[in-house]
Image: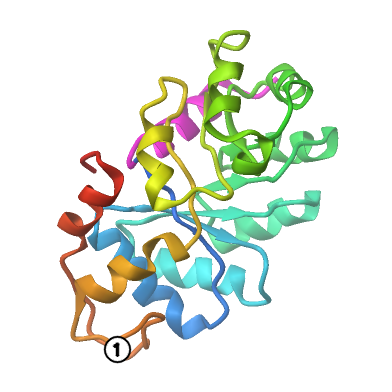
């Protein structure tokens, strides 16, 4: 079993904002401006996926330059990924699924883990390993809002961060569910807001590292989510 402290920490992290941007960073120059813009809009908890060669460098850069943000590493699929994420400064980790090897790796890390599940069997396995705050992935393909609702009755102690296929139109419906603590859309969810809410930057995202980021995204995100952040 994982310590209660780690479970409470991931719950606390996800509770900071109702939306956790899931970001794939392809250019290191875009990492810090992107983190600054999102944090300025109240979205301080960011997941950086291990889908590009510079992902860990982006995490390290964000941690150093944007201390007000909480930076996690996602797409942890091998036990060795955990040590690499820890070395880069990850403040939490996210997996698309959970195996006994990944659960063992999580026990030795300083950061808490948000493990991914898709089925009731996955959920039972994760809960037996000590997790009750889980990522439902891919959320839309797994059954969407109806799936989250159905899992609530047999698993009343579990909270979810649905990720995968969530649109701006459906975000508020997910967040209205009592067993949803947050949602994890990809960056496309925010592109329109970032492009129209940031001044003194390039007209379109991604941003140049030499740009001066001055955003007013705090007001722009609220009508999209239908909920204050």
Q: Residue 94 in the image: x percent, y percent?
A: 61, 46
Q: Main structural element of the magenta stretch: helix, strand or loop?
A: helix
In the image shown, does 29 or 110 lie closer to the viewer? 29
- In the image, taking residue 219 as reference, residue 116 lies left or right, namely right
The magenta stretch is 1-17
- In the image, taking residue 82 as reference, residue 224 lies left or right, namely left
Residue 191 within the segment the image draws in magenta: no
Residue 168 to residue 120: above or below: below
Which residue corresponds to mark 1? 202
Q: Residue at x 33, y 42 (%)?
A: 17
Colouring scheme, one of rainbow, by chain, secondary structure, one colour:
rainbow
Judge the density around disc 1: few (<14), some (14-19), many (≥20) Cα neighbours within 10 Å: some
Residue 3 to residue 56: above or below: above
Residue 139 to residue 2: above or below: below
Q: Secondary structure at mark 1?
A: loop
In the image shown, does 109 or 101 lie closer to the viewer? 101
Residue 62 position by quadrant: bottom left
Q: Residue at x 46, y 64 (%)?
A: 187
Position of the C terminus by quadrant: top left
Residue 178 position by quadrant: top left
- In the image, taking residue 8 as reference, residue 165 lies left or right, namely right
Residue 3 within the segment the image draws in magenta: yes
Q: Residue at x 75, y 41 (%)?
A: 105
Q: Residue at x 60, y 12 (%)?
A: 155
Q: Residue 1 in the image: x percent, y percent?
A: 70, 19
Residue 142 to residue 122: above or below: below
Q: Residue 40 in the image: x percent, y percent?
A: 23, 62
Q: Residue 191 in the image: x percent, y percent?
A: 38, 69
In the image shown, does 120 or 24 lie closer to the viewer? 120
């Amino acid at each position: 079993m994982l310590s209660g402290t780690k479970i409470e920490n991931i719950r606390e992290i996800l509770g900071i904002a109702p939306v956790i941007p899931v970001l794939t960073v392809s250019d290191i120059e875009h990492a810090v401006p992107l983190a600054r813009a999102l944090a300025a809009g109240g979205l301080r908890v960011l997941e950086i996926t291990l889908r590009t060669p510079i992902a860990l460098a982006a995490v390290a850069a964000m941690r150093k330059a944007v201390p007000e943000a909480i930076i996690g590493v996602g797409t942890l699929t091998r036990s060795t990924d955990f040590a690499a994420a820890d070395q880069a400064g990850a403040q939490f980790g996210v997996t698309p699924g959970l195996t006994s090897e990944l659960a063992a790796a999580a026990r030795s890390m300083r950061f808490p883990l948000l493990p991914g599940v898709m089925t009731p069997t996955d959920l039972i396995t994760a809960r037996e390993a000590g997790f009750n705050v889980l990522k439902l992935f891919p959320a839309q393909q797994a059954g969407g809002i109806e799936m989250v609702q159905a899992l609530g009755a047999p698993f009343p102690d579990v909270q979810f961060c649905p990720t995968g296929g969530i649109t701006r139109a459906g975000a508020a419906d997910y967040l209205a569910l009592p067993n949803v603590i947050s949602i994890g859309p990809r960056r496309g969810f925010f592109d329109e807001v970032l492009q129209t809410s940031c001044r003194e930057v390039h007209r379109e995202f991604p941003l140049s590292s030499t740009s001066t980021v001055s955003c007013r995204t705090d007001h722009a995100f609220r009508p999209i989510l239908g909920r204050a952040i």
